[in-house]
Image (cartoon, rainbow, N blue to C red):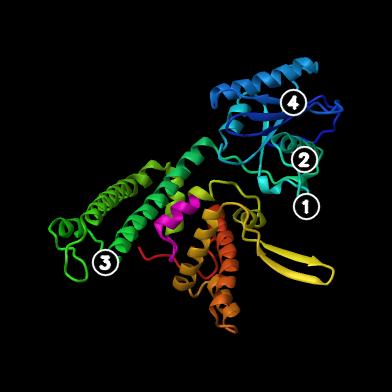
Amino acid sequence: MQPTQRDDRSGALDVSLELAGKAWKLAATDGKRAHPAVLVVDAAPGAQRLQGLLHRIQELRHRWRLARDCAVHVVYEAGQDGFWIARALEAHGIQVIVVDAASVPVARHRRRAKTDRLDALKLLEVLRAWLRGERGELRVVHVPSEAAEARRLLARERGLLLKEVGQHRDRARKLLLLHGCTEEIDDGFVERLMAGKVRRADGAALPEELWNWLLREAERLDLARQQLARLEKSLMHQLPEPVQRCVAQLAQLRGVGWVGAMRLVLELFWREFANRRQVGACVGLVPQPYDSGDSHVDQGISKQGNRRVRALLVEMAWFWVRYQPRSAIAQWFARRTAPANNKRGKRIAIVAAARRLAIALWRYLREGVIPAGAELKHT
């Protein structure tokens, strides 16, 4: 929710929250106080702490004789608490701003005082500047809907299970290498282990401790495989029809699989973007130049936003260059990397290609315009 610009005499209540596990530090002002009020909400985490925060806000309204329906703006930094606080406060008519913690300006001294109280006061200061129209002070995070955030967990759970399968397999392989055994960790590994066919390099039996560990590791691997198979089988059916159509539309392009298409839709394209610059900025694939005096340095990309989407787009760009060689993006990549013909140059150019691909896919979903030179899969 975007609050309107106002001055300090409007009688609104501005509140900043410094979230912590034991308690929340609250700084507040109505613009007429010489010093903001600093309070603590130390109720039990969850619903009780939220009610304590609402009670504190109501106390401040009464103490400062503010109107019952006066505007209340609350700001806090995005973190492990997620967005449930924002949704709960907005349900009570409070305007909430969730900000990227890295965008809050701090003193550049080598040593500086840092406490929850000082952080809350600083956050309140930049909130009031942001409300006055100084939008360069903070980077506001877009709060997803509850449904969009829940669907996003499906793709993330699949990624974690896939990673867990690889970890169990790799751990078992490395344990066997300690005794010179290069046994394959496949579907029949447990049977061979139980039959005593998995042996050391010298032909002797494995130590009992190692044998037991490998058996438990194989059981965890099998469980992770089963969970991954069940999730992949039901994943698409759990998505709403409009989301399924977007995934299917992206998967029609050569070089784009259904997994990459699903992850991109759930992680990125649930948002509405006004232009291509917003797409590039959201995934952090925009350049960060350093141009001061005689110093002209390219600092690389900003790396802001969703790191999962950024890594996914770079991976998809490699596939795009391979399977869409006639596309404008692939040809641009070939022209940029042909003179250098080195791995480092290609790694740099693929990031720019990933940004172009994100914009092209966004236009494809939004307007139905197939990326220039791209081909669809044969059905």
Q: CA distance from mark 3 to mark 4?
A: 69 Å
Range shown magenta: 252-265
**Which of marks 1 and 3 precedes in the sequence?**
1
Q: Which residue is mark 2?
A: 126
Front: mark 3 or 4: 3
Q: Residue at x 52, y 59 (%)?
A: 311
**Which of marks 4 and 2 precedes in the sequence?**
4
Q: Which residue is mark 4?
A: 71
Hey, what amino acid is under mark 1? Arg
| Callout 1 secondary element | loop
Q: Is residue 162 above or below residue 91?
A: below
Hey, what amino acid is under mark 4? Ala
- Label drawn at residue 7: none
Q: Which residue is mark 1?
A: 108
Q: Are marks 2 and 4 in contact (CB under 8 Å)?
A: no
Q: Residue at x 55, y 40 (%)?
A: 80
Q: Residue at x 78, y 51 (%)?
A: 109
**Which of marks 4 and 1 precedes in the sequence?**
4
Q: CA distance from mark 1 to mark 2?
A: 16 Å
